[in-house]
């Protein structure tokens, strides 16, 4: 009897185990230096967008950066079966999402692959394209394509219209911070946040730069600033939603009148 219970519990734990997804940095196929920031940018935006939208645990970018640096492995470039399996084991990820992008004139194309990291088998491929000036829209289309496969339906999310320059500066700063060029990174973050103060990622980057330098007083002040901007941003979002309606306005609504007449 105990053996049967043990087997049932083991089976249940396997069934309940969640998949873990890791998003790798994307390869800049054409090596266009002006768009190097998209390598980490596409991956980081996908991690942010997918978090909480799919029934998988997602490896944080910081963990990816840490593990790959310790192992001295390349985060971009062609990922073959052996490399996919190796990376999956290092990150304890059962699925990998990676790919490349190419800039041709004023057009950008992003290709991605969803891979089973235990076998190296490619499960699904994705491809989106559009104008380079609207690369954030193209990235969002990639996100929608991925979620439609992982969730089984299109996920409705609010798209925040960020200035492209602010996003570019942030990811350029992020790469500098990863390379421990803290002063240069913070300059990028400050410039990015000056363009869009409610874009919290560069604000968080400034905080990280102070923590790296062990300037905890300024880091604490920056944290308070981030919380203030976040509160204002949330309030702005609430004000943008449909306002509450009075009973009189609802009663005068044509839909309400039609429903009331049908119930008589």
Image (cartoon, rainbow, N blue to C red):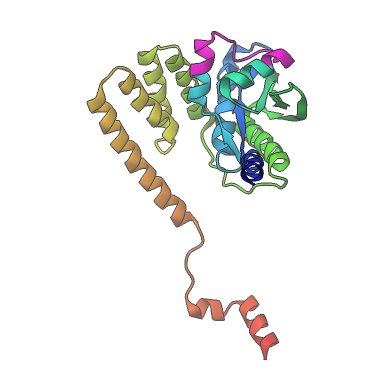
Q: Compared to 97, does 50 lie above or below?
A: below
Outermost residue, top direction? 72
Which residue occupies 32% across, 42% down?
A: 228
Q: Nearer the viewer, residue 155 or 33?
A: 155
Q: Compared to 262, does 239 lie above or below?
A: above
Outermost residue, bottom direction? 264
- In the image: residue 216, left or right of residue 256: left
Give how far across and how far down residue 88 sits, in percent: 63, 21
Give how far across and how far down residue 133 sits, in percent: 62, 29
Give how far across and how far down residue 144 sits, in percent: 67, 40
Report which quarter residue 134 is drawn in: top right
Give how far across and how far down residue 194 sits, in percent: 39, 30
Outermost residue, front direction? 1
- Residue segment shown in magenta: 66-83
Q: Nearer the viewer, residue 98 or 195?
A: 98
Q: Compared to 154, does 94 lie above or below?
A: above
Magenta stretch holds residue 186: no
């Amino acid at each position: 009897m105990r053996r049967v219970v043990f087997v049932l519990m083991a089976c249940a734990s396997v069934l309940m185990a969640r998949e873990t997804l890791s998003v790798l940095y994307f390869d800049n196929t054409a090596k266009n230096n002006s768009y190097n920031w998209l390598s980490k940018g596409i991956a980081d935006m996908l991690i942010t967008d997918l978090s909480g939208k799919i029934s998988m645990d997602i490896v944080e970018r910081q963990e990816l950066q840490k593990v790959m640096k310790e192992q001295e492995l390349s985060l971009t470039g062609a990922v073959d079966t052996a490399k996919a399996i190796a990376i999956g084991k290092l990150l304890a990820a059962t699925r990998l999402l990676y790919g490349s992008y190419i800039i041709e004139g004023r057009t950008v194309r992003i290709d991605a692959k969803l891979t089973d990291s235990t076998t190296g088998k490619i499960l699904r491929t994705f491809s989106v394209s559009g104008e380079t000036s609207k690369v954030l829209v193209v990235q969002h289309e990639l996100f929608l394509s991925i979620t439609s496969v992982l969730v089984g339906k299109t996920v409705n999310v609010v798209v925040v219209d960020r200035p492209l320059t602010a996003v570019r500066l942030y990811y350029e700063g992020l790469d500098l911070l990863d390379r421990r060029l803290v002063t240069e990174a913070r300059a990028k973050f400050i410039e990015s946040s000056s363009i869009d103060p409610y874009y919290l990622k560069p604000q968080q980057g400034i905080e990280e730069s102070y923590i790296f330098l062990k300037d905890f007083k300024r880091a604490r002040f920056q944290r308070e600033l981030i919380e203030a901007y976040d509160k204002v941003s949330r309030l702005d979002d609430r004000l943008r939603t449909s306002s509450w309606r009075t009973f009189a306005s609802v009663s005068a609504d044509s839909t309400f009148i039609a429903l009331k007449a049908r119930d008589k």
